[in-house]
């Protein structure tokens, strides 16, 4: 249970168990073909990636907590609509924009007079801008669901505008107890590691946070859009977008 603010507002975060395990044979260990420390690191990274995926799912599920003025759906990147969201967030503090690389390559001002020589060089080298009209852009690291490298983890259709100095972080991660790590030696002298953790994730969005949904990218977890340029037809507070209701 969390307690927030001077009034000691409390809320519950449901937790569930996550874990992982790995095993190496005795001969693999003797030959040095498998590093047990590396296997342990992979298991721990897998658990952290699962939590990261849950954070993304919690943010998507909580978008209707925002006031209608704080959320926009558009087919592509609509500069005027996005600028309005930035201004709303700026009223509460210096905003930072969080999005994936695929979203960022579209988030480029259309008017060429805005481009300095440094911006042109940055666009040539990276395909995107590190800042959007003076606002810092943080790229959310993308990953893959498995070793096939075919399906992405983070939905590229979302961008979040969050001001600095907010009363609390929009995502709460609760850890119940400690991470349990056990190591076993088998009868055949194999070595096994098992990791167990109880964790819960919940998003609580307030009226100082804004969300932009690019319906052209929304839910596209298999195709990469890194050379699309700038396009978009505005669709303010459009109806159900691939199962995500953003109407007020």
Image: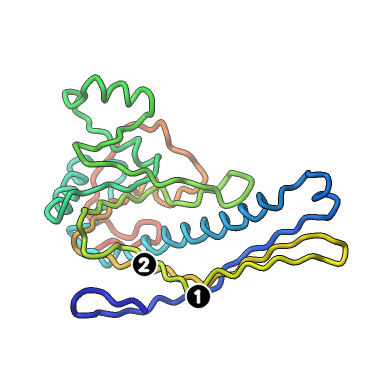
Mark 2, other Cα within 10 Å: few <14 / some 14–19 / many ≥20 = some
- Which secondary structure lies at badge 1? strand
Q: Residue 177, labelled with which disc?
A: 1
Of 142 and 94, the residue lying toward us: 94
Where, quadrant-wise, is the C terminus in this rendering? bottom left
Numbered badge on residue 172: 2
- From this view, report whether residue 94 is shown above or below residue 119: below
Q: Secondary structure at mark 2?
A: strand
At 58% across and 57% down in the image, what residue appears? 44
Is residue 248 something that shows in the picture? Answer: no
Q: Is residue 105 left or right of residue 183?
A: left
Q: Residue at x 37, y 43 (%)?
A: 139
Q: Position of residue 233 (x, y in %)?
A: 26, 42
Tell which tag, 1 or 2, sits nearer the viewer: 1
Q: CA distance from mark 1 to mark 2?
A: 16 Å
| Residue found at the very far right of the displayed protein | 188
In x, y percent, where is residue 57? Answer: 43, 61
Which of disc 2 and disc 1 is earlier in sequence? 2
């Amino acid at each position: 249970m969390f307690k927030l603010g001077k009034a000691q507002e409390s809320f519950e975060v449901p937790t569930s168990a996550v874990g992982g395990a790995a095993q190496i044979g005795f001969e693999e260990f003797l030959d040095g073909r498998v590093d047990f420390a590396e296997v342990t690191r992979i298991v721990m990274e897998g658990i952290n990636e699962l939590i990261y995926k849950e954070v993304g799912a919690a943010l998507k599920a909580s978008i209707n907590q925002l006031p209608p003025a704080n959320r926009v759906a558009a087919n592509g990147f609509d500069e005027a609509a996005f600028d309005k969201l930035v201004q709303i967030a700026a009223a509460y503090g210096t905003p930072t924009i969080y999005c994936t690389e695929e979203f960022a390559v579209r988030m480029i001002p259309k008017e060429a007079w805005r481009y300095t020589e440094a911006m042109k060089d940055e666009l040539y080298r990276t395909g995107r801008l590190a800042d959007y009209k003076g606002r810092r852009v943080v790229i959310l690291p993308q990953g893959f669901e498995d070793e096939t490298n075919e399906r992405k983890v983070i939905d590229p259709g979302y961008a979040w505008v969050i001001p600095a100095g907010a009363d609390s972080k929009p995502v709460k991660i609760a850890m119940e107890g400690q991470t349990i790590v056990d190591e076993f030696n088998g009868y055949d002298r194999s070595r096994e590691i098992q990791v167990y953790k109880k964790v819960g994730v919940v998003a609580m969005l307030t009226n100082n946070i804004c969300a932009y949904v690019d319906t052209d990218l929304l839910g596209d977890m298999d195709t990469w859009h890194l050379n699309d340029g700038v396009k978009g037809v505005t669709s303010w507070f459009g109806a159900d977008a691939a199962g995500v209701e953003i109407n007020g």
